[in-house]
């Protein structure tokens, strides 16, 4: 079945450092979505990428969709303690009415 | 405010008992989903429904059952056949199918007594 892997599983950074998580699919995707889950909370939708090579920015967050539409990345510039949480990518192959969530990357930020 | 309401927040199950988790949405969304999340893990799809009176198995449907009699409601029953039910259960909804963003409820934490 559809496999969606994220790396790293966990990253600990000091406030002000940059952070990147990568999402890789075994198949070509129709679109990819990113979610953030704060500790003890529920996933919250951040963004959706649809086009090959697409880049979108939300303040300090930059999202990219690979040219082959099989991978994606989320980059956070100058992390803050409010960025703490687990970031999930969620893949849509376009063949089923559901998303396949990645394994997630847990980000810890310390002062 | 529109949103998804899951209840209860915490639930305890005895051996051999079936329990039902409630999920209600007032977003007028067609599609609804149930996920299971184990500590430090990602979300695994249990069941999903695109329209009323129709639902499909996800990746880990064994030991679970659902119904979709109303657009607003998608209850999940954890049956006694589910031998390892302790987990965080999340309900979500979306306007349409897989390419639409999903909105999540606050979740239900289920534990075995």
Image (tube, rainbow, N blue to C red):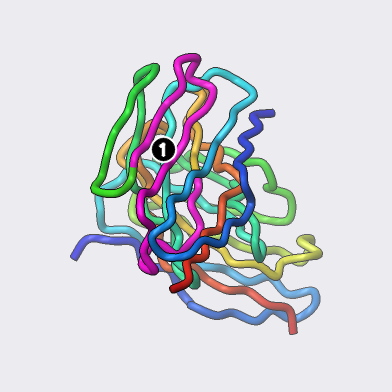
Establish if A41 lies above or below B56: below
Q: In the displayed structure, does residue A48 sit left or right of residue B38?
A: left
- Please report the residue visible at 51 percent of the width from the left and 57 percent of the height from the top: A86
Please provide percent x and percent y for residue A18.
43, 51
Choose top left, top right, bottom left or bottom right for residue A12.
bottom right
- Please report the residue visible at 45 percent of the width from the left and 15 percent of the height from the top: A67
| Element assignment for label 1 | strand
Asked if the stretch drawn in magenta spans residue A72, the answer is yes
Outermost residue toward the left in this view? B1
Give the residue at mark 1: A33
Between residue B54 and residue B106, name the one nearer to us: B106
Outermost residue toward the bottom in this view? B113
Between residue B92 and residue A83, name the one nearer to us: A83
**Residues shaded magenta:** A62-88
Please provide percent x and percent y for residue A83.
39, 61
Between residue B56 and residue B101, name the one nearer to us: B101
Establish if A26 lies above or below A41: above
- Please report the residue visible at 52 percent of the width from the left and 71 percent of the height from the top: B108
Establish if A11 lies above or below B32: below
Quadrant location, the C terminus of chain A: bottom left
- The chain holding disc 1 is A
């Amino acid at each position: 079945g559809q496999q969606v892997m994220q790396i790293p599983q966990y990253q600990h950074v000091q406030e002000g450092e940059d952070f990147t998580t990568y999402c890789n699919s075994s198949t070509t995707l129709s679109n990819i979505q990113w979610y953030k889950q704060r500790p003890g909370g529920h996933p919250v939708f951040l963004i959706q990428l649809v086009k090959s090579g697409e880049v979108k920015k939300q303040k300090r967050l930059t999202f990219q969709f690979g040219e082959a539409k099989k991978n994606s990345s989320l980059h956070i510039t100058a992390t803050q303690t409010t960025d703490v949480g687990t970031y999930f990518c969620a893949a849509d192959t376009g063949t089923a009415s559901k998303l396949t969530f990645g394994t997630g990357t847990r980000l810890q930020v310390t002062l | 405010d529109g949103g998804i309401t899951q209840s209860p927040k915490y639930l305890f199950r005895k051996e051999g008992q079936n329990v039902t988790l409630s999920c209600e949405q007032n977003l007028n969304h067609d599609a609804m989903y149930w996920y299971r999340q184990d500590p430090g893990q990602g979300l695994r799809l249990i069941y999903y429904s695109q329209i009323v009176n129709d639902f499909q198995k996800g990746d880990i449907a064994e030991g679970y059952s659902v119904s979709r009699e109303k657009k607003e409601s998608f209850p999940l029953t954890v049956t006694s056949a589910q031998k390892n039910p302790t987990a965080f259960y999340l309900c979500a909804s979306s306007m349409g199918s897989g390419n639409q963003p999903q909105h999540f409820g606050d979740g239900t934490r289920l534990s075995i007594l």
